[in-house]
Image (cartoon, grey):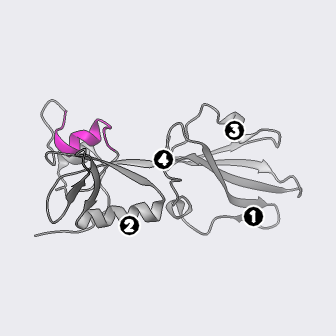
């Protein structure tokens, strides 16, 4: 559902909350709702809708306006610039204690409270830019994929949906590419 652009035409009486009551529209889904402008004949209002996560409230914002005289007037920014606020969503992060790249800080109950080092700085920047929070789980290894299709370590945690994001350095291998998604590389080594 996340890759195509979805367009649905609503009558002006249809309410977004009613229509999408039991429908999950992922954060990265392009789902557009088109309704007649209540004030101008021949004008359509295009609204994009999504949810930050399952069970979270439906978010909507005006995507553009189409009218018979001027055509489409769409957004000025791309998808992820328009959706740069996660509204406090908690992101479950794993990492490996690997100084100086990533260092765990723990409270008196031995719970990880933050990560410092290179990846700690990266996730702090993400937290600030995306308006989200993080909780942490330690991975004992980067992980590898086994012949039976299961994976260990941080890779396994991602595959099993134990965490949402791994803040650690991974070598990109074909097995790992089959199991998880990688971001754009943020640093390289030789």
The residue labelled by disc 2 is 125
Q: Reading the chain from its start, which is encountered first: label 4 or label 3?
A: 4
Rendered location of residue 49, percent (x, y):
62, 48
Query: Mark 2: which secondary structure?
Result: helix
Rendered location of residue 121, percent (x, y):
30, 67
Q: Which residues are magenta?
A: 150-163
Q: Reading the chain from its start, which is encountered first: label 1 or label 3?
A: 3
What is the quadrant of residue 122 in the picture? bottom left
Which of these two is toward me, 168 or 79?
168
Q: Residue at x 13, y 47 (%)?
A: 141
Report, in whole angstroms, how far the alpha carbon at label 4 lies from the one at label 1: 25 Å
Query: Mark 4: which secondary structure?
Result: loop
Q: Reading the chain from its start, which is encountered first: label 2 or label 4?
A: 4
Q: Residue at x 61, y 69 (%)?
A: 76
Label 4 vs label 3, nearer the camera: 3
In the rendered structure, find residue 3 and report the number of the disc placed on it.
Answer: 4
The residue labelled by disc 1 is 71
The residue labelled by disc 3 is 17
Report, in whole angstroms, how far the alpha carbon at label 4 lies from the one at label 3: 23 Å
């Amino acid at each position: 559902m996340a890759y195509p652009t979805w367009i649905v035409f609503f009558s002006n009486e249809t309410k977004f909350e009613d229509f999408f009551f039991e429908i999950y529209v992922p954060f990265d889904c392009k789902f557009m709702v088109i309704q007649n402008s209540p004030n101008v004949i021949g004008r359509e209002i295009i609204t994009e809708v999504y949810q930050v996560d399952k069970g979270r409230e439906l978010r909507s914002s005006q995507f553009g306006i189409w009218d018979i005289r001027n055509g489409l007037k769409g957004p000025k920014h791309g998808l992820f610039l328009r959706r740069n606020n996660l509204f406090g969503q908690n992101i479950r992060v794993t990492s490996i204690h690997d100084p100086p790249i990533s260092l765990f800080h723990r409270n008196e109950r031995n719970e990880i409270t933050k990560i410092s080092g290179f990846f700690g700085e990266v996730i702090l920047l993400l937290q600030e830019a995306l308006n989200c929070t993080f909780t942490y789980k330690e991975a004992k290894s980067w992980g590898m994929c086994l012949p039976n299709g299961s994976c260990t370590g941080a890779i396994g945690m991602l595959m099993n949906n134990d965490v949402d994001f791994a803040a650690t350095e991974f070598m990109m291998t074909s097995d790992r590419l089959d199991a998880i998604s990688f971001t754009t590389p943020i640093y390289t080594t030789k």
